[in-house]
């Protein structure tokens, strides 16, 4: 049942990934799930830039060097994480949003649609036993210059994926949905 997949989805980070490759077919399946997210007026604002293979190293170099040039509080640890995490992953996808050129819907609805596409990616990856998480480091704002983006398109985050071994921890919530719900009569 879909509720079990939702409840069992977890953030899985590159330190937890093994070296098993993610196939192009698996990535395409995850992106197809994203493509079926709800979208107001069918604007389908999600766009994806896939780093799979040698391009992952280029991404890491760009992220770490951009961090070094733009940060006011340099940290060797942050630099190394930005350099190495893309290579430790089985795949990294830049999640982008293409604004509707006619502005038929408010920007927040486009952001919501892209967020739902990411949720679909996360659930599809979980179903395939591929760990994932969304990262939004400050250097994401600089990826526009690294990627060939269309007018009105911008990067929102990086979706890291990798295969992993072993069970994931159980999830929890602070309170059940019933405590966050008001039924209106």
Image (cartoon, rainbow, N blue to C red):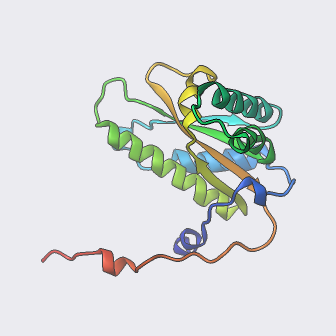
Q: Quick one: 35 or 70, which is closer to the camera?
A: 70
Is 131 drawn above or below residue 94 in the view shown? below
- Image coords of residue 66 (percent x, y): 65, 27
Residue in the foreground of this view, choosing between 47 and 67: 67
Q: Residue furthest right?
A: 19
Q: Position of residue 166 (x, y in %)?
A: 79, 72
Q: Quadrant of the N terminus?
A: bottom right
Left or right, 170 with respect to 19, comes to left
Q: Give me the residue at 68% from left, 40% from top.
A: 75
> Left or right: where does residue 131 sit relative to residue 178?
right
**From the viewer's perspective, is residue 54 above or below residue 148?**
below
> Which residue is painted at 39% across and 35% down in the image?
43
Which is more toward the observer, 39 or 109? 109
User: Residue, x 21% and y 77% (percent of image)?
Assistant: 183
- Tag count: 0
Name the quadrant containing residue 80. Answer: top right
Residue at image coords 77%, 56%: 15
Quarter holding residue 72: top right
Report the residue that reaches farthest toward the left.
Answer: 185
Q: Quadrant of the C terminus?
A: bottom left
Where is residue 102 shown, x and y percent of the image? 31, 24
Judged left or right of residue 168, residue 176 is: left
Determine the residue located farthest toward the front in the rendered image: 73
Rendered position, 167 above or below 150: below
Q: Is residue 10 above or below residue 120?
A: below
* Left or right position of 77 against 137: right
* Coordinates of residue 96 in the picture (x, y in percent): 53, 35
């Amino acid at each position: 049942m879909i509720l079990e997949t939702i409840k069992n989805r977890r953030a899985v980070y590159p330190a937890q990934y093994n070296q098993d490759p993610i196939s192009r077919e698996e990535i395409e399946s995850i992106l197809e799930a994203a493509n079926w997210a709800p979208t107001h007026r069918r604007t389908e604002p999600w766009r994806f830039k896939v780093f799979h293979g040698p391009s992952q190293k280029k991404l890491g170099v760009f992220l770490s060097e951009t961090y070094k040039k733009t940060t006011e509080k340099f940290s060797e640890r942050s630099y190394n994480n930005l350099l190495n995490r893309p290579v430790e992953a089985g795949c990294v996808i830049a999640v982008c949003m293409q604004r509707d050129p006619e502005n038929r819907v408010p920007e927040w609805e486009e952001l919501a649609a892209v967020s739902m596409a990411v949720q679909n990616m996360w659930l599809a990856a979980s179903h395939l036993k591929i760990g994932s998480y969304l990262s939004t480091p400050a250097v994401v704002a600089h990826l526009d210059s690294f990627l060939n983006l269309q007018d009105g398109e911008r990067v929102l985050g990086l979706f890291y994926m990798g295969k992993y071994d072993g069970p994931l921890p159980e999830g929890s919530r602070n309170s059940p949905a019933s405590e966050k719900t008001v039924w209106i009569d």
